[in-house]
Image (cartoon, helix red, strand yellow):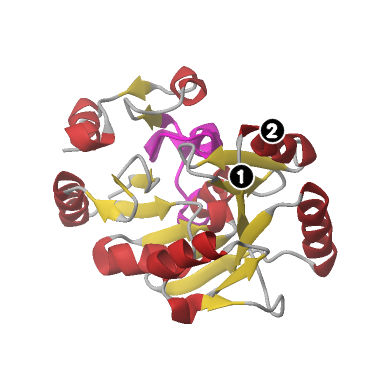
Amino acid sequence: MDKILFFDIDGTLGKHGVITESNLKVLHLLKEKGYKTFICTGRAPFYASRLFGNLVSGIISCNGRYILYEGKKLYSRAFTKKQLDYYVHKLDQGKLGAMFVSDDQALKYHLDKKQEVNLEKEYGIERLVDSLEGEFYTFDMFYQNQEHYQTMVELFKEDLIINDHGGMGSCDCSTIEFDKGSAIAYLLDYFHLDKDNAYAFGDGYNDQAMFREVGHGIAMGNAVDVLKEKATYITDNFDQEGILKALYHEKLL
């Protein structure tokens, strides 16, 4: 089938690593229909792969900088040493903690004990390392309070789109030079598909990049206002069968 669909995870398919039963069924239905389906997330590739396995055609992770197709790496865009040094300098300047993501590991950088424990629960202690050796594709940042958050936003305003995780003290980052939309554009070219046959579902600030490259941008009912303003359709909340309702509206099911 000449349709391709892209789904954010948190706030779109589920929350905190738990995908709703309705959305799991939707992914099964789309697979049966023969559509190409991609997860499109700021999360690590190993995290998204663990959640979805063979349920989707592929995964765009690290906010666009890492693409898996049929279980194999199709494209990746690691930070150069210069970029990595630059981000580390900025983090130190803002006294910010971070988690850098590689192919199969996550680097802890200046995190407190509580933050480390939370990451161990979410990713597994075997995934967490302390060395900046290897290739890294994205990073999450951690802040202590609203004033600290504003400092972070100001520090990185020229470089990143910051997607806050609902006031939980952490956020993921999209690089302005290559984001979720860049990865979608790459895949549309790879599969020889046009925007009219591409659909994206999201809820966060970083999902604006997806909407830029598709003909159909569907915002969840729980999405941030700026994303709703750029949507071609606004559906219900992620936990109220918003995706299923949108698929019927778009005549994909």
| Residue 140 drawn at (x, y percent) | 59, 54
Query: Is residue 62 on the magenta stretch?
Result: no
| Residue 167 drawn at (x, y percent) | 49, 37
Q: Which residues are magenta?
A: 188-216
Residue 144 numbered mark, or none: 1
> Looking at the rendering, in which quadrant would you find the C terminus?
top left
Residue found at x 14% / y 50% = 25
Give the secondary structure at mark 2.
Answer: helix
Residue with the mark numbered 2:
150
Viewer-nearest residue: 245 or 134: 134
| Residue 40 drawn at (x, y percent) | 44, 51
Separation (CA) of disc 1 from disc 2: 11 Å
Q: In the rendered image of this protein, does residue 72 appear above or below residue 163?
A: below
Which of the two labelled residues, at mark 1 and mark 2, occupies the earlier sequence position?
1
Give the secondary structure at mark 1.
Answer: loop
Q: Which marked residue is nearer to the observer: mark 1 or mark 2? A: 1
Q: Is residue 107 left or right of residue 84?
A: left
Q: In the rendered image of this protein, does residue 80 appear above or below residue 22?
A: below
Residue 220 numbered mark, or none: none
Q: In the rendered image of this protein, does residue 16 appear above or below residue 118?
A: above
Amino acid at pointer 2: Gln
Query: Is residue 202 on the magenta stretch?
Result: yes
